[in-house]
Amino acid sequence: MNTSISVQFEKYRRGGIGKKVTELYLRDDISCGLVNCQICKTPGNTLHIEGEDRTIFILDEYTVLTQLDVILNCPKLVNVVLMQTTVHNIQKKNQNTYTSLRNLVEGEIYRNIHIYANEYSKYTYTPIQQNEKQETRDTRAVLEAAVWYQNHLKSSMRDIEILFITSDYQSHKIALEKGLNSTTIFEFVKSIKGEYPNLMDFLGISEQAMDIEFEGQQVLFQEHLTLNELSNKVKAGDLFQGKLKIDRNDINDGTVFIPKYDFEIKIIGQPNLNRALHGDLIAIELLPENEWISSNYMGDNEDEEEDFKNVHEAVKTNNSNKQLEEKYLNVVEKIKKLNLNPTGRVVGVIKRIQRYFCGEVTPEAINLPNLPSGIELREFIPADGRFPHFYLRTTNGSQLQGKKIQIGFDNWSKSSKYPLGHFKMLIGDSGDTKAEGDVILLEHNVEYRAFSKQVLDCLPPQDDKWQIPQSEIKKRVDLRGINVCSIDPPGCKDIDDALHCISLPNGNFEVGVHIADVSYFVRPDTAIDKEAQNRCTTVYLVDRRTDMLPKLLTETLCSLKDDGDRLAFSVVWVMDKDANIIETRYHKSIIRSVASLNYGKAQSMIDDVNDNSELTKSIRNLNMLAKKLKQKRIENGALSLASTQVKFTFDDETHNPVDVQFYQMYETNSLIEEFMLLGNVAVAEKIVSHFPSISILRQHSQPKPKQIKELSQILQKIGFNLDYSSNRNLADSLDKVNRPNDHFFNKLVRIMTTRSMNEATYFCTADADYPEFYHYGLAAPLYTHFTSPIRRYADVLVHRLLAAAIDIEAIPAYMSNKLKMAKICEKMNMRNRMARFASRSSSDYNTYLFFKDKQIEEVAMVSSISKTGATVVVPRYGLEGQIKFSEKDLKENEKLLQELKQNQSLIIDFVVNGNRHKLFDYLKVRVSVGMKNFHKQITLEYLGPN
Ligand SMILES: [Zn+2]
């Protein structure tokens, strides 16, 4: 029913058709979309008028942007027309709203949404007038098009009514003047209140409306400057702009990083934060120097920082703006001279963060005299503690109690302690595993809905009975006769890779890495390709997997299980016994795995001296070669780093975690890792040699200078030298950071080193110069991702590049568009980061479940110190948390700080409970978890020195 819409949607999604071109191609045959239209030259096929309801709704841009949740939840809005101008602007202004809109257009059956190409129609094209702002023109264009629609449909079918819905009173007024049947969204929702009372809950409230409701309340915040004022002052260098980061441990503490000049502004306290939210792009005014603060502790190294430093300027400033530069450099100078951290206050929000919030409501309703009847306020507590509580307007607060819900941000009045939000979605019961998992996915913007029909239609028709066509087998190298096997974590169902190793008569080895041939099934530009391109990656929670591709592919057709023939993309090497590569071949193949092993099983086969089967012998050879490959990598400067990744053991019946510990590594983990690295490097070299400017690679830069320097400084204080002048030197010096009989110390230093690293990222080779291709951690000049196409979109792209490099397929058109590829890389990097955070949240939640109702005494090592407490890691559980300083501790630490500050730049000493400790000391702690404001809190109580 909706096909023609999606086609039109696509047409301007690719965009790029400028105004001049438009004028030349104005058409008179663009359909209004109405089925059986009496007038249109080309009959429409989207708007079906059936039964009693004979209204076609036209929604304007502001309505879609601010009231999306009403639109998504209003069953009345069946036949809807959106002007191309509207959709285009929404895409520009809010990607999330645009995606929701696209899903609505492509998804639901009962909605008939027509997008009218008003900009291409002879009847509705509205040229911009002299001195007219684009925004004003666009509003006018949409109104003109709506008027045309009303007249057009009147003459086509008499009994059809047009209703123009806006949420802007000015537009409403003009619409009425033009004779349009117009209403505001508020009036509309009110008018159908009898039929759909809950719809009121989805309604977003404007700032003016909120001010009215909060009238008579005390004014708590300073007025924000207008966007125009903000922009002018930023350009003049009188205000700073940046993305606000709220401290995880203290919601009253914010930081804004100023990228070009490499300094931070601290914003302390709610009045100074002045209604800005974590992630907002804000404008800041500096406070006088006597209010600046000192920082004597090592900075915390959360890896999300990346996101806050690579921020595009919200207000474009001129690069050669001398005045601005002077003012900024002046500040930099002062910071150096005073050795203090500047502080500031928020004077306005340039762009609000675009997201929804999961959380829960508190039991009590809040009363305000000016609330409309039937509406009450509830306090909403977001799952992410970096966001303030909200006031939620709702008609049925009591029914929301004990539930996880998702809400949207509306506004924050200067007379309100909290921002105001509206209901978006009920997730489930609090504490329910499924609901808690959904919250984690939603909070990290992971798409977890079922795949659409369009996507599933791209799969082979016979489902799991699908057979590889004979014609396809003929095109490939047939490897079904050799012992190919896979080694993965236990229970792995989406097997991306398999290997083989054959001893050659001359003492050399033939080694093959075989990767699931996902790109055979996922063809460029199909619905399934677009879906994978949007999801970018499979997301692993502790107890759940959210796939990038439908299960039929991930678990059956592509998964290289030992139950039949599979299509693979292979890299095959001939290497000598010292793992020197003699020859590399790339080809598509057909394989038949003889064993799907897990790491433990493969390890026991290697270790079992009585096992001399051909398969075991080949795995032993792979292991022998892997060790030599690893040695070579280390000699080249590759780092071996550590993470706090933990593994849970679950009770079979209750599915509650019964143990948690650091992830156990076998030699076989390393075996697989080595050959995957080797495969990725080999493919990177191949694709870059053929497509130097459109290859997708993975890059990893040097450690963050400030962080690695700080780490080196604190290690120096306890007698170790960390040389970070090159990756080779860093690797060597890390090996020497050892304390006798203290294995964990070295591991913790490696974890801290890892945190001082930038994250590895995908990039298109068009956007970087050769030296920037380097992968610092792996010490590889070229690196890419080839080995996990079932769960990573980057690998799918790389498979296509490799297929083109060996001349078996052409490069899809969009993949030679450098701009498009850069965008895809940006998205893949964002999704990867989110996937990582989601996994970590899930791990945290399970840690909470494990420690719930327990009080465990353990030994922990101090990993960092801040003003408010000491962070420690418990080696037994891989658990990290803060020992909060008591009032008494705080005073003593302030005293100690004053004492030490004279001759030390970084403080690694602290006092807790009267005892003096240092970084890397072992302490005894009691671990317990609790809930505070619906947030799990890992509490580490100090018991004494170890
Ligand atoms: Zn028509």
Image (cartoon, helix red, strand yellow):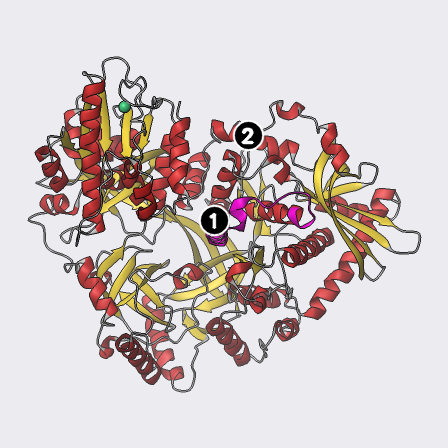
The outermost residue toward the bottom is 903
Tell me how far mark 1 sits from mark 2, CA to CA: 24 Å
Which is more toward the observer, 410 or 438? 410
Look at discs 1 and 2 and give the one toward the viewer: 2
Residue 89 lies, with reference to residue 881, above or below; the image says above
Q: What element does badge 2 sit on? A: loop
Q: Which mark is residue 831?
A: 1
In this picture, which residue range is highlighted in magenta? 804-833
Using the image, determine if residue 129 lies above or below residue 74.
below
Q: Residue furthest top?
A: 51
Determine crowd level at label 2: few under 14, some 14-19, many 20+ residues with C-alpha closer than 10 A.
some
Q: Amino acid at mark 1?
A: Arg
Where does residue 460 sit, x and y in percent of width and height? 61, 27
| Percent of width and height locating residue 597 | 73, 41
Residue closer to the observer: 775 or 555: 775
Tell me: residue 726, above or below residue 308.
Answer: below
Identified by mark 2, the residue type is: Cys
Question: Mark number for residue 458?
Answer: 2
- Magenta part, dominant SS: helix
Residue 891 falls left or right of residue 683: left
Q: Position of residue 752 (x, y in %)?
A: 53, 66
The quadrant where ligand 1 appears is top left
Which residue is drawn at the image coordinates 63% and 68% (left, top)? 742
Residue 493 appears in the picture as rendered: no
Q: Residue at x 18, y 24 (%)?
A: 192
The answer to whether residue 826 is left or right of residue 499 is: left
Q: Is mark 1 within 8 Å of ligand 1?
A: no
Q: Is residue 313 visible?
A: yes
738 and 26: which is toward the camera: 26
Q: Secondary structure at mark 1?
A: helix
